[in-house]
Amino acid sequence: MPDYQDVLTTASQLSVDDRLRLIDDLASSVPDDQPPHLSEEWLAEIRRRSDEIDAGTVQTESWSVIRDRLFARHGVSDGR
């Protein structure tokens, strides 16, 4: 099995479109029961935003809508 550095070196040679697709696919593959370790600052921001959602003071959007908007803004195709 290749090691992290081999994978990173190879992935770094992909086109920007393919690297973004890879990032999205890798993020989707992380099990829900193994979230990333976050700093206290990020945890506080998450709590603040969650409180806003719970209070109904912000309107949310689905990830697919946000992702499509970001890809369009940067001229990136997801190739799917």
Image (spheres, rainbow, N blue to C red):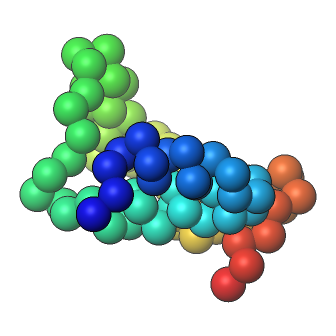
Residue drawn at x 58%, y 54% is 11
Left or right of residue 5, residue 76 in this image? right
Locate residue 24 relative to residue 39 in the image: left or right: right
Q: Residue at x 71, y 72 (%)?
A: 78
Q: Is residue 69 visible?
A: no
Point out the residue furthest to the bottom here. 80
Whether residue 3 is situated above or below residue 51 in the rendered picture: below
Label tally: 0
In the image, is residue 72 above or below residue 47?
below
The quadrant of the image that shows the C terminus is bottom right
Residue visible at 61% across and 65% down?
Answer: 21
Which picture quadrant has residue 42?
top left
For this orientation, the residue located farthest to the left is 33
Seen in the image, is 24 located left or right of residue 51? Answer: right
Coordinates of residue 39 in the picture (x, y in percent): 26, 19
Q: Would residue 32 be found to the left or right of residue 30 on screen?
A: left
